[in-house]
Amino acid sequence: MPAPRVAIVTAAGRGIGAAIARELAAEGYALALLSPSGAAERLAGELGALGFTGSVTEPSDLGRVVDETLERFGRIDAVVNNTGGVPKGDLLDHDDGAWHASLDMVLLNVVRMARLVTPVMRRQERGSIVNISTFCAFEPSLDFAISSTLRAGLGSFTKLYSERYAADNIRMNCILPGFVDSLPHGEDKAEKIPMRRIGMAAEIAKTAAFLLGDGAGYITGQNIRVDGGLTRGV
């Protein structure tokens, strides 16, 4: 039997990250899971994966995950960059600290992970990275001012990265979820969605698994909305 593909999933202890970990495990991936709470270690025990407690905002934690994944499995085929939320509030109410912390959480974590895994994927002559973003990356919302601003930057980085490394058979895409059941939402949110329901974390997970797999082998540099039709941009 061929060796299983190996994937790293961050913020994998609960919600969308945990759903992605479960989906990839079901597809036969060997996994390394990271979260700050210890929940990823517990899920890793359930799935037979490597588990780590740490933060995507700490370069040393990311380095430890990559190093130990390579030591255990010898390769890294896929990465899912998932993160926690960023502060909400009125546009100019956020101080510099909130902006800088969110930059680490939303964008620099992806840049840092790319620095670590790209040389590995180039040696392998293949790799795929999926970044979990948000529907408001390209339809900014005042309700999510920091997230809207920084995740638009994430979309730009994704496009630039995909252009730079496509010839090395390394792909990077973003998923832009709408309102998902991993967070509490009132009925008013569902009424704004053409499908008239909140999305499921499992649906985001299946999209991530598709984008990481061979079926998406010609898809790179894309920001794919999985939002039930919430956003209106063409």
Image: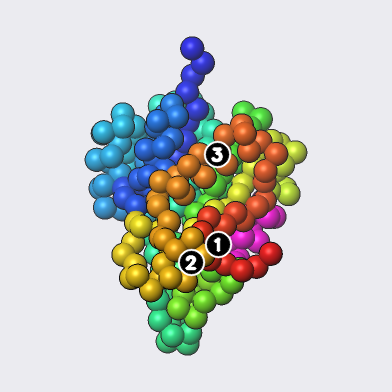
Q: Are marks 1 and 3 in contact (CB under 8 Å)?
A: no
Type of secondary structure dominating the magenta stretch: helix
Which element carries disc 1, helix, strand or loop? loop
Picture quadrant of residue 87: bottom left
Task: Look at the numbered discs 3 and 2 and tell me whether their residues touch, using CB distance below 8 Å.
Answer: no
Q: Nearer the viewer, mark 3 or mark 2?
A: 2
- How busy is the neighbourhood of tag 3: few (under 14 within 10 Å), some, or many (20 plus)? some
Cα distance, mark 1 to mark 3?
20 Å
Give the SS element for disc 3. Answer: helix
Which is more N-terminal, label 2 or label 3? Answer: 2
Mark 1 vs 3, N-terminal side: 3
Q: Choose top left, top right, bottom left or bottom right for residue 95.
A: bottom left
Q: Residues within 10 Å of mark 2 (few under 14, many from 20)?
A: some
Percent position (x, y) of residue 174?
Answer: 57, 53
* Kind of residue sitting beneath label 3: Phe
Task: Please tell me whether residue 150 belongs to the stretch shown in magenta.
Answer: yes
Q: Is residue 210 left or right of residue 61?
A: right
Q: What residue sits 45% from the left and 29% below the top?
A: 27
Check disc 2 and report the residue beneath it: 193
Start-end of magenta stretch: 149-161
Nearest the viewer among 47 and 166 is 47
Q: State the residue lying farthest toward the bottom.
A: 92
Tag of residue 210: 3
- In magenta stretch: residue 43: no
Q: CA distance from mark 3 to mark 2?
A: 24 Å
Percent position of residue 81, x then y: 48, 50
Query: Residue at image x 31%, y 50%?
Result: 14
Identified by mark 1, the residue type is Gly
Disc number placed over residue 229 in the picture, else none: 1
Give the alpha-carbon distance from disc 2 to disc 1, as whole Å. 6 Å
